[in-house]
Amino acid sequence: MPLPLLERDSMRIPKWVEFSKEIEIDLTSEDINVILEESETLRGLLYNINTILQFLKGVPDKLIDEFNDGHRKIIINAFEEIIAKMRTK
């Protein structure tokens, strides 16, 4: 298939251009579980756990102040379960 002519003495050709662009993606808890389960090495798993911890540490106080007692109880219980699991293994 011949390439189309655009203007006199020019033509259009395919060209790959690489670029980077920041995007936002939504991850579900299921997605995160799969990522952690698929960690192939201890180092990879620790890296992923560190990423999650950094995210949690970065939650602004302003948002934490909006938690009600129910929110706090659920989150604290989840953290306590994780701590107990880490201590007993």
Image: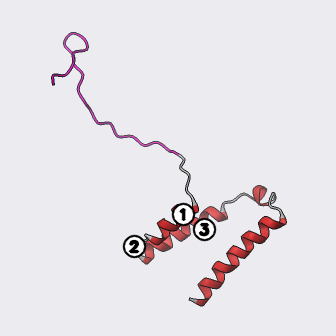
Residue to which mark 2 is pinned: 40
Callouts 3 and 2 close, C-beta under 8 Å:
no
Callouts 2 and 1 close, C-beta under 8 Å:
no
Residue to which mark 1 is pinned: 30
Foreground mark, 3 or 2?
2
Q: How is the image coloured?
A: secondary structure
Residue 14 within the magenta-colored segment of the rendering: yes
Q: Is residue 69 above or below residue 60?
A: below
Disc 2 crowd, CA 10 A, few/some/many (<14, 14-19, 20+)? few
Q: Quadrant of residue 13?
A: top left
Instruction: Point out the tag, 3 or 2, that comes first from the N-terminus.
Output: 2
Residue to which mark 3 is pinned: 53
Q: Amino acid type of disc 2?
A: Glu
Part of the protein shown in magenta: 1-23
Per the model, the C-alpha gap separating discs 2 and 1 is 18 Å
Instruction: Point out the tag, 2 or 1, that comes first from the N-terminus.
Output: 1
Per the model, the C-alpha gap separating discs 1 and 3 is 17 Å
Q: Amino acid type of disc 1?
A: Glu
Residue at screen point 55% across, 56% down: 27
Q: Position of residue 54 (x, y in %)?
A: 60, 65
Residue at the extreme top: 8
Residue at screen point 78% across, 55% down: 62
Q: Is residue 66 above or below residue 76?
A: above
